Image: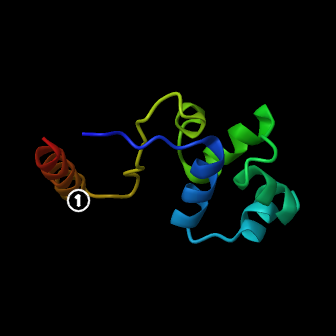
Amino acid sequence: MSKELFSLAERIKLLRERLNMTQSDLARILGLTRSGVNAWEMGLSIPSARYIVELAKVFNVSADYLLGIEDTSTISIKGLTEKQVSVLHEIIQCFRNTDE
């Protein structure tokens, strides 16, 4: 199985789009301009350590994942029933089995 590697810029864009956020939405949450977020996504600038932490919180991922140090993402199961969590585990296992 080949692993798809993403740059920090690509991860920011991908995670933002997964949440159906515009660049303006993300900028507003972080107290920045849209052009600042656009510069990150274009790879023209890099977020400071403070914004890496803030982005990780907004996207509900670890800073290591955002930076590409770790390729494991997390999914919050807060508010789900035990049965729903069990179903998610089964689905994940099905995906793992098809990748072999």
- Direction from residue 30 to residue 55 in the image, left or right: left
Residue 14 image offset from top left, x and y in percent: 55, 57
Residue at 63% from the left image edge and 46% from the top image edge: 57
Q: In which quarter of the image is residue 48?
A: top right
Q: Which kind of residue does numbered mark 1 sit on?
A: Gln
Q: Name the quadrant of the C terminus.
A: top left
Identify whether 87 is placed above or below 6: below
How many numbered markers are drawn? 1
The figure's colour scheme reads rainbow
- Direction from residue 8 to residue 78 in the image, left or right: left
Residue 64 image offset from top left, x and y in percent: 56, 31
- Direction from residue 70 to residue 42 in the image, left or right: right
Q: Crowding at label 1, few (<14), some or many (≥20) Cα neighbours within 10 Å?
A: few
Identify whether 49 is placed above or below 14: above
Residue 13 image offset from top left, x and y in percent: 62, 58
The residue to which callout 1 is attached is 84
Residue at 77% from the left image edge and 42% from the top image edge: 51
**Which residue in the rendered view is the most extreme toward the top?**
69
Nearer the observer, 91 or 68: 68
Q: Name the quadrant of the N terminus.
A: top left
Residue at 66% from the left image edge and 48% from the top image edge: 9
Identify whether 65 is placed above or below 99: above
Residue at 73% from the left image edge and 47% from the top image edge: 43
Q: What element carries label 1?
A: helix
Residue 33 image offset from top left, x and y in percent: 88, 62
